[in-house]
Image (cartoon, rainbow, N blue to C red):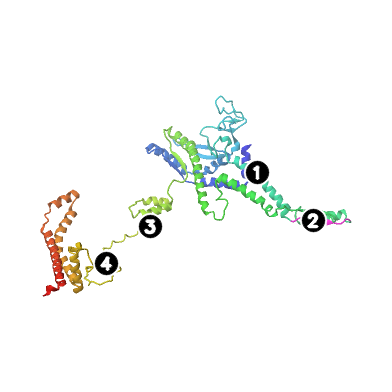
Amino acid sequence: MWQILAEEIERRDPHYLSVLNTRKLAISQLPITVTPASSDAAHVKHADFVRGWVERGILRRSLYDQMDALAKGFSVHEMEWHMEAGNYWPAELTFRPQRWFDISMQDGETIMIRDDCATPALPSVADGIPQPGFRNMEPYKFVTHRHAAWSGLTIRGGLTRAAIWPVMFKLFTNRDWALFVQNYGLPMRVGKYTRDASDNDRKVLLRAVSDIAGGAGCTIPDSMQIEFPEPKTASSASDIHERRFRILNEELSKLVLGQTGTTESKQGAHASGQVHREVQVDIERADTFWLSYTATTQCAIPMVSCSFGPQDAYPVITIGRPDEAPFDDVIKALQFGGPQGLKVRCQDIYDRLSLTPPEDGDAVCGIIAQPQPVEPAHVLPAQDRAPQDMPARVSVPTTQSPQEPDQQNTLHAALGRLVARHAREEPHMVALLTNSLAHAAQPILDDMIIPVRRALMQAKDMEDFRQRLGDMELSPAAFAQAMAQGMAAANLAGELMVLDEIGRDPAGHG
């Protein structure tokens, strides 16, 4: 039968058995969660009931055997119920070999129990005929997990249907490899005897050749020759069986695991290992989806229905890792987002690290970084420094530079000549004049700036600030005084122009 052959394939091929166990063991260790149908109190109670059963470990112990459907198309567990009013749950899930069952040839989906003495099983399709040699499976008595290896009927499911050819070729290759090693890997012993050797001498020689090392030996007359020709391509023929063996193993790894990164270590395969890991995650999610569906429909729903009656919605059993960001990304988000105002519950971080928050009196490690105090800006007092004559890198216009006729009599030019003259004859004159003007103008500016600043600090909004500005009575005398100082500077410029004209006119000195 097919199921017996599938068991023999796994038993005879260690590599196929190993990759199957890799996939089955990975699934059987994943976390199991129970989600209520809604936030309703009754639904939460049902979820707590199913969660309590899951925590007993009954379901987890059966996951490995349920994954046997990966190779054979389906797996069956017999349920032993704990029966108590309002408290029904599977007390035991016992794995039953697939050879005890068979799939109906009528629809290719219905799984039946082999029993030659029982009443024939009911038809699997409409208008079908009874099926002798089988009996139907009792409801709520078995957990039947179907694992889709590809699209199609369950009767044609199971990876063993695709793996049987590489496994058979490997067995043939292994036999040929053994013959090759026996013929060319071990030395051949040839014993020669002369014509005058008696039958007893020949028997002694044959026994000696056989006793040296196994049966790879022979005896021939001294006048005869035996040649042992090797293949023409001896260098490649020595590992041809090994290379074929490896290729078939790689094909089996791709069939079961979807990649070869976890079974065949190759130099420089770190980059491809990341891609292989993504393939593993995709396959893992698909496997857990089918197992979650089986556990919910064939375990959780019957438990709730029998204990609390039929419901409009039932809790969901989910097997697999939760969809959450990698922990490295979480740490980076806290490092960069925390100073910007990102807030996260400490309990969530403890849960991700499987740690327990410390209690009062516990010795703890780690400190909280203290905020750095903000230092005020350094304000240096103003200093009066004597002007320095620095050579210019690029020639710039000066008061002595030729000017256009319309620019010679401007106030800007006159002031420039005044500043140049004072800087040349009295180096400190410009600095003293500047300081004097600043001290004289400071009270005037304070009388205008301080009330405006006070109104701005006390205003509740822009409309309030506008109203406060309207209520202020800023004296125009301040502006008049500033204008007077500007006119004084202009007068000084005019006097400079007169002095320059007198200096250039020789007749004026007479």
Is residue 121 depicted above or below 431 in this figure? above
Q: Amino acid at mark 1?
A: Met
Q: Position of residue 201 (x, y in %)?
A: 85, 56
Q: Position of residue 205 (x, y in %)?
A: 82, 56
Any part of residue 354 in sight: no
Q: Which residue is mark 4?
A: 396
Q: Magenta span covers which residues? A: 187-195
Q: Nearer the viewer, mark 4 or mark 2?
A: 4
Q: Is residue 267 left or right of residue 233?
A: left
Badge 2 crowding class, 10 Å Cα cut-off, few under 14, some 14 to 19, many 20 or more, is some
Q: Is residue 194 magenta?
A: yes
Q: Which residue is mark 2?
A: 190
- Between 299 and 184, the residue placed more toward the observer is 184
Q: Quadrant of the N terminus?
A: top right
Q: State the residue lying farthest toward the right.
A: 196
Q: Which residue is mark 3?
A: 362
Q: State the residue lying farthest toward the top.
A: 127
- Between 401 and 145, the residue placed more toward the observer is 401
Check if mark 3's residue and mark 1's residue have beta carbons within 8 Å. Answer: no
Check if mark 1's residue and mark 2's residue have beta carbons within 8 Å. Answer: no
Q: Nearer the viewer, mark 4 or mark 1?
A: 4
Q: Which residue is mark 1?
A: 168
- The tag earlier along the polypeptide, 1 or 2, is 1
